[in-house]
């Protein structure tokens, strides 16, 4: 199947090796396929349609990667149990908790973490 880039999100890292190890382990829970695009960028793609789930990058300008205040990457999962599992895995890999899994607004079930570089992610299931 050819990869057709429809959309993607990139988060910065100051330690590409550590970030790759973190996301290799974490995204293995959803069978994401790793694609090292070049020496600065690595992407993980959906096994179903090769869409990009997440990309990490060392900043092009050579300056320190920083997280955005109010920025967050959401990763949709197929079930509440998958959200629980992804959250637990992230915490076990050294992520910082920012909201345990739970029912939020209406049909939104989510959990929140900060990765090793301080990037905020939510794992969620939205079943309406």
Image (cartoon, grey):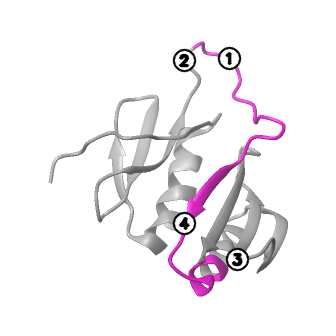
> Is the magenta region chiefly helix, strand or loop?
loop
Cα distance, mark 1 to mark 2? Answer: 8 Å
Give the x, y percent position of residue 107. Answer: 70, 77
Disc with the residue nearer the chain's start (3 vs 1): 1
User: Circle 1 sits in a helix, a strand or a loop, which is it?
Assistant: loop
Picture layout, residue 38 above or below residue 18: above
Disc with the residue nearer the chain's start (1 vs 4): 4
The residue at which mark 3 appears reads as 107
The stretch in magenta equals 61-84
**Disc 1 + disc 4, Cβ < 8 Å:** no
The C terminus is located in which quarter? bottom right
The residue at which mark 1 appears reads as 63
Give the x, y percent position of residue 9. Answer: 54, 40
Q: Residue at x 26, y 42 (%)?
A: 4
Cα distance, mark 3 to mark 1? Answer: 40 Å
User: Circle 3 sits in a helix, a strand or a loop, which is it?
Assistant: loop
């Amino acid at each position: 199947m050819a990869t057709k880039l429809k959309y993607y999100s990139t988060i910065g890292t100051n330690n590409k090796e550590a970030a790759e190890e973190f996301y290799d382990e974490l995204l293995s829970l959803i069978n994401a396929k790793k694609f090292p695009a070049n020496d600065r960028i690595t992407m993980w793609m959906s096994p179903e349609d090769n869409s990009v789930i997440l990309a990490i990058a060392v900043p092009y300008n050579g300056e320190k990667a920083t997280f955005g205040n109010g920025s967050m990457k959401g990763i949709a999962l197929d079930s509440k149990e998958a959200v629980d599992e992804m959250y637990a895995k992230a915490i076990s890999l050294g992520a910082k908790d920012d909201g345990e899994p739970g029912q939020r607004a209406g049909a939104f079930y989510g959990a929140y973490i900060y990765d090793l570089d301080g990037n905020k992610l939510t794992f969620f299931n939205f079943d309406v």
